Image: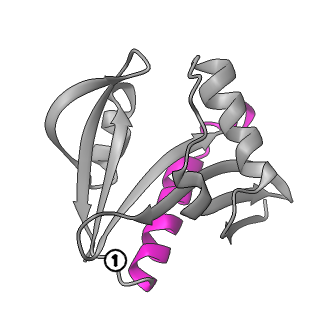
């Protein structure tokens, strides 16, 4: 199985399609696309040329800090550790850009996934479109 991760400087339709399917159609989010999409870098993981997973990242407010988000894997591609692969690709790109810390606003249901990737929860859980979320962070080595 040939996989490839591509990084885009503008939101590609492949990433938008995955996010619409996962976050809007499956999970019921309405405000999926925002101003951050205009400045973020977008990663798409392809399997045999077919888009299977995506995420985005952009600089945070502190020096060396980046925000990762919108990690999504197409339903038919789940169970292959693609979420961790696209997240690792984002971490590598952030390291190359000089980043030293990543923060993300995780869905509470995905908290164990991020903890396995080395992220630690902080702050108080909150709601994003009625879905429980928690802030998490990781210092890059």
Residue drawn at the location 23% of the way across and 69% of the way down = 62
Q: Is residue 51 visible?
A: no
In the rendering, at what x and y percent does residue 6 appear? Answer: 70, 69
Q: Is residue 85 above or below residue 78?
A: below
Q: Is residue 76 above or below residue 8?
A: above
Q: Is residue 37 visible?
A: yes
Frontmost residue, 67 versus 2: 67
Q: Is residue 21 magenta?
A: no
Q: Quadrant of residue 16?
A: top right
In the rendering, at what x and y percent does residue 50 appear? Answer: 84, 52
Frontmost residue, 39 versus 22: 39
Q: Which residue is tagged 1?
A: 99
Stretch in magenta: 74-96
Main SS of residues in magenta = helix
Frontmost residue, 14 versus 84: 14
Q: Secondary structure at mark 1?
A: loop
In the rendering, at what x and y percent does residue 73 appear? Answer: 63, 40
Q: Quadrant of residue 68?
A: bottom left
Q: Is residue 82 magenta?
A: yes
Quadrant housing the C terminus? bottom left
């Amino acid at each position: 199985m040939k996989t490839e991760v591509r990084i885009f400087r503008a939101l590609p339709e492949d990433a938008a399609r995955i996010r619409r399917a996962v976050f809007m159609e499956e999970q019921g989010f309405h405000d999926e696309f925002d101003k951050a999409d205009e400045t973020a870098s977008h990663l798409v993981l392809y399997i045999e040329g077919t888009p299977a997973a995506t995420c985005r990242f952009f600089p945070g407010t502190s020096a060396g800090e980046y925000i990762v988000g919108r990690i999504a894997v197409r339903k038919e591609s789940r169970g292959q550790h693609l979420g961790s692969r696209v997240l690792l690709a984002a971490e590598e790109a952030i390291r190359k850009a000089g980043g030293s810390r990543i923060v993300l606003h995780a869905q509470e249901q995905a908290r164990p996934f991020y903890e396995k990737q080395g992220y630690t929860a902080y702050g108080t859980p909150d709601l994003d479109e009625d879905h429980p979320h928690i802030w998490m962070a990781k210092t890059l080595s």
